[in-house]
Amino acid sequence: MTYGFDKDFWERHWQQGRAGGLGSMGGNPPNPYLARETSGLTPGTALDAGCGGGAEAIWLASQGWHVTAADISSEALARAAERAATSGVSEHLQWVEADLSVWSPGAQFDLVMTHYAHPAMPQLEFYDRIAGWVAPGGTLLIVGHLHAAGSTGHGDHPPAEASATCAAVTARMDGVEWEIVTAEERLRTLTGHGGRAVLLHDVVVRATRRR
């Protein structure tokens, strides 16, 4: 099966109304890596690249960050904005409909983060692209699906083109420009459809851009 990850794909994905889906789908909480990896950072400006249902962006705004949250799906952004309206932090959030494979924010941020986002471009090239939006001294946080050889995207397993490994991600970061703070592959469990336990294989990379 081939995944295009274009606007039509993501609009269909969100219009299916998967309220019990994975990650920040529907009403699920933000992934736990976000709090762990940003707790020691001073709140400033942030970009959530591929914000989906907005759980991570809203949580970050609740911590005092000013967040630009971008996604290609208007349906996802509508759900995110609705959720934010009841959070009390809407004034700290800006929702942007954008194709991240071609869009540029026109600014750099103290924190650029992405959580399981899959644009219509190679996954590692996407990480390269958003890394350029990190201001000197700022932080890049990548949370992605761990690559599994032969994965076809059936069931709960993402297709190979939407996954990566820690080694593949960090190998693209110049040691002169970047300091790797976190690079790990972890397992965690979510509650999926019908209350079924779903095991996620995650890649977590946090890096600081040197001044």
Image (tube, rainbow, N blue to C red):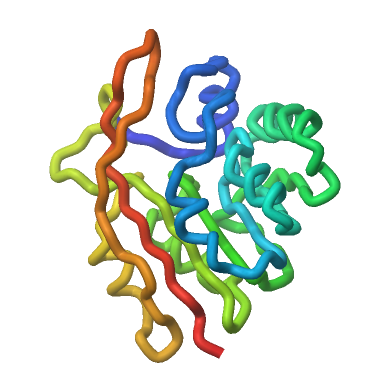
Q: Quadrant of residue 45?
A: bottom right
Q: Quadrant of the C terminus?
A: bottom right
178 in relation to 45, above or below? below
Image coords of residue 3 (percent x, y): 38, 35
Left or right, 14 with respect to 200, comes to right
Point out residue 88 in the picture as x, y percentages from the top left corner.
81, 38
- Seen at 58% across and 24% down, the residue is 27
Can you tell which quarter of the image residue 72 is in?
top right
Q: Is residue 200 above or below residue 75?
A: below
Q: Nearer the viewer, residue 113 or 97?
A: 113
The foreground one among 120 and 129 is: 129
**Image coordinates for residue 209, horizontal then vertical, percent:** 51, 80
Residue positioned 27% across, 22% down in the render: 155
Q: Position of residue 104 (x, y in %)?
A: 66, 63
Residue at the spot 71% in from the left edge and 50% down from the top edge: 61
**Most distant residue in the front direction:** 40
Residue reaching furthest top? 194
Q: Residue at x 27, y 59 (%)?
A: 184
Q: Considering depth in this image, is 56 or 171 the residue closer to the camera?
A: 56
Asked whether residue 161 appears in the rendered view, the answer is no
